[in-house]
Image: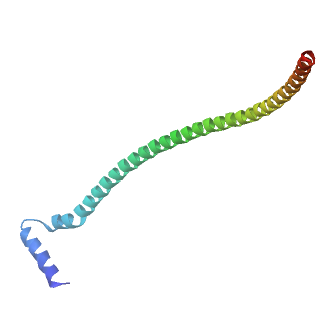
Amino acid sequence: MDPAVITAIATFFTAANGWTVGTVLLCIFVVPPILGLVAVLKVVGVMSALKDEIRSKNEQDNRRFEAMVAMFNQQHAEFATKYDNNVYLVKNWENTAGDMTNLVYLNTQAVTSLSHKFDQLIGIWTSDRNGRKQ
């Protein structure tokens, strides 16, 4: 053994003047393990409390995550509905545009026909006027 350790043990026994050997052995070999056990139990209690706190935090995070997923699903459904409505609108707009094209075509034909009728009437009117004047 190291002389410093022997000196420390001798000093300890000198300081513990009235203690018996059993008391010293009890203080050296029984008290530290008991203190270690108490410390371990304390750490286990703190770890258990932390575990419960972490579990509670995880449950809150899970609820928040599920709320966000539900909100995303709702927004996705709304977007899909809006997209479907836009597709329907475009298809109807194409139909309306086709109908408008037909309407413009028919109006153009009618105006052209009307123009020919006016030309005929003007031709008849001018020939009538020319015939009466002479």
Q: Nearer the viewer, residue 133 or 79?
A: 133
Please tell me which residue is depicted at 63% across the width and 37% down the height of the picture: 77
x%, y% of residue 95?
78, 32
Q: Residue furthest top?
A: 132
Could you say which is closer to the camera, residue 123 or residue 6? 123
Residue 65: x and y in percent read 50, 43
Assign the C terminus to one quadrant of the image.
top right
**Farthest residue toward the front?**
134
In-image side of 82 versus 101 (left or right): left
User: Residue shown at 36%/47% (left/top)?
Assistant: 49
Taking depth in this image into account, of 121 and 84 the one nearest to the observer is 121
Q: Is residue 95 left or right of residue 125?
A: left
Coloring scheme of the render?
rainbow
Q: Is residue 5 above or below residue 129?
A: below
Residue name at image x 56 percent, y 38 percent: 70
Question: In which image quadrant can residue 109 be found?
Answer: top right
Residue 131: name its quadrant.
top right
On-image quarter of the N terminus: bottom left
26 shown above or below 114: below
Q: Is residue 72 left or right of residue 14?
A: right
In the picture shown, does residue 97 fall above or below 54? above
